[in-house]
Amino acid sequence: MQAQASAEEDRAASVTPPVRPSMPWRVREVTALPDYRLSVRFVDGLSGIVDMSALVSSPGAGVFSCLRDRERFEQVYLDHGAVVWPGELDLAPDAMHSAIKQNGEWRLV
């Protein structure tokens, strides 16, 4: 009986579509740019720049101070539509989308 249940579970897993972030503020692409900036494009097609230079270099950078290391900054990647770095650092995609929609960029200070 166990083997039959496993076969049914496997069959169900194969027809379940993968999770694809669909909210308009989910990020589809991210690229590290010079001067602690990021180029982002969202699932709704909106694109812009995230300028982290002031934040990263400030004495109040907190957990983001580790991104002063350019090599670490360039390790940026996407996780379910959010911009993240190793070490559980991430940026709020909804706030990013709102600022870029209004200003064409998001400046973090």
Image: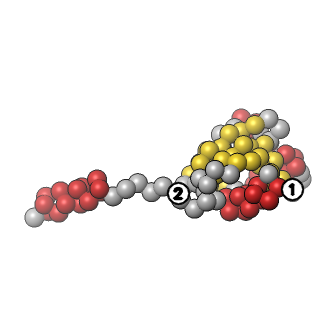
The circle drawn on residue 109 is: 1
Q: What residue is drawn where x is 48% and y is 55%? A: 20
> Crowding at label 1, few (<14), some or many (≥20) Cα neighbours within 10 Å?
few
Left or right for 10, reference 56? left
Number of labels in the image equals 2
Q: Quadrant of residue 98?
A: bottom right
| Position in image of residue 106 (x %, y %) | 80, 54
| Position in image of residue 54 (x %, y %) | 88, 49
Give amino acid for label 2: Pro
Q: What residue is drawn where x is 37% and y is 56%? A: 17
Q: Nearer the viewer, mark 1 or mark 2?
A: 2
* Residue 51 appears in the rendering: yes
| Position in image of residue 103 (x %, y %) | 82, 55
Question: Which mark sits nearer the N-terminus, 1 or 2?
Answer: 2
Give amino acid for label 1: Val
Q: What residue is drawn where x is 33% and y is 58%? A: 16
Label 2 sits on a secondary structure element that is: loop
Label 1 sits on a secondary structure element that is: loop
| Position in image of residue 15 (x %, y %) | 29, 56
> Crowding at label 2, few (<14), some or many (≥20) Cα neighbours within 10 Å?
some
